[in-house]
Amino acid sequence: MTVTLGRQLRPRWQRDDGAAVPEFIVVVVGILIPIGYIVVALAQVLGAHAAAQHAVREAGRVFVRDTAIHAGQWRAHEAATIAFADRGIELPHHALRLECEPSCLVPGGTVRAVVDWNMPLPWLPDSLSPFVSVPIAASEEFVIDTYRPAGV
């Protein structure tokens, strides 16, 4: 007669049956979900940074080719909005600035297109935006062609 020391003879705290579900829940909730959120947030921040670079380039190009300051500002803002919309991000109206030296659309002058805003992290309530937002900034300088008519 053989005596087996199976599961019946072990104390309850030494058994391993039924532990897979709680371990799975702890791993998924405690580790995989935060890692997934970090990956999504990082992808959106990098996308916003790339959109900002694209937006200043296109806004500056559009502005220096225009002959009227106000129309050029409007077209530059539209170009920047489209650059952000390509990434699925809405550009705040105040985020784009056009800085002119010595004055806007003077042949030989320079225009600096600047995008500067704080991007809220995805899926967080708006009340947390001032505390957990990522600064997105980009700028580029453009020279206004010397052989063009001055802006109106």
Image (cartoon, rainbow, N blue to C red):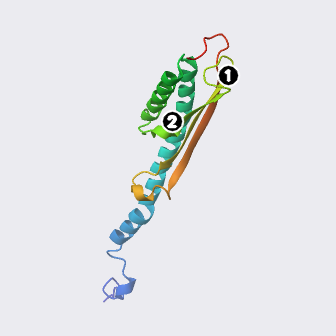
Picture coordinates of residue 49 (x, y %)?
A: 54, 40
Q: Which mark is residue 66?
A: none
Q: Which residue is mark 2?
A: 51
Label 1 near label 2: C-beta < 8 Å? no
Quadrant (top left, top right, bottom left, bottom right) of the C terminus: top right
Q: Residue at x 32, y 74 (%)?
A: 18
Answer with mark 2 or mark 1, whichever residue precedes in sequence: 2
Picture coordinates of residue 57 (x, y %)?
A: 57, 28
Circle 2 residues within 10 Å: few <14, some 14–19, many ≥20: many
Q: How many marks?
A: 2
Nearer the observer, 58 or 4: 58
Q: Residue at x 34, y 86 (%)?
A: 12
Quadrant (top left, top right, bottom left, bottom right) of the N terminus: bottom left
Nearer the observer, 68 or 75: 68
Residue type (three-letter) at the residue carrying disc 2 = Ala
Task: Specify the quadrant of the image occupied by residue 142.
Answer: top right
Left or right, 149 with respect to 80, comes to right
Left or right, 102 with respect to 29, comes to right
User: In the structure shown, which secondary structural element does the residue marked by tag 1 occupy?
Assistant: loop
Q: Residue at x 45, y 49 (%)?
A: 40
Residue type (three-letter) at the residue carrying disc 1 = Gly
Q: Identify whether 70 is placed above or below 138.
A: above
> Which-is-in-front pick, marks 2 and 1?
1
Q: CA distance from mark 2 to mark 1?
A: 26 Å
Q: Identify whether 142 is placed above or below 148.
A: below
Q: Which residue is mark 1?
A: 109
Picture coordinates of residue 36 (x, y %)?
A: 44, 54
Q: Identify whether 33 is placed above or below 72.
A: below
Circle 1 residues within 10 Å: few <14, some 14–19, many ≥20: some
Q: Residue at x 43, y 66 (%)?
A: 30
User: In the structure shown, which secondary structural element does the residue marked by tag 2 occupy?
Assistant: helix
Nearer the observer, 3 or 69: 69
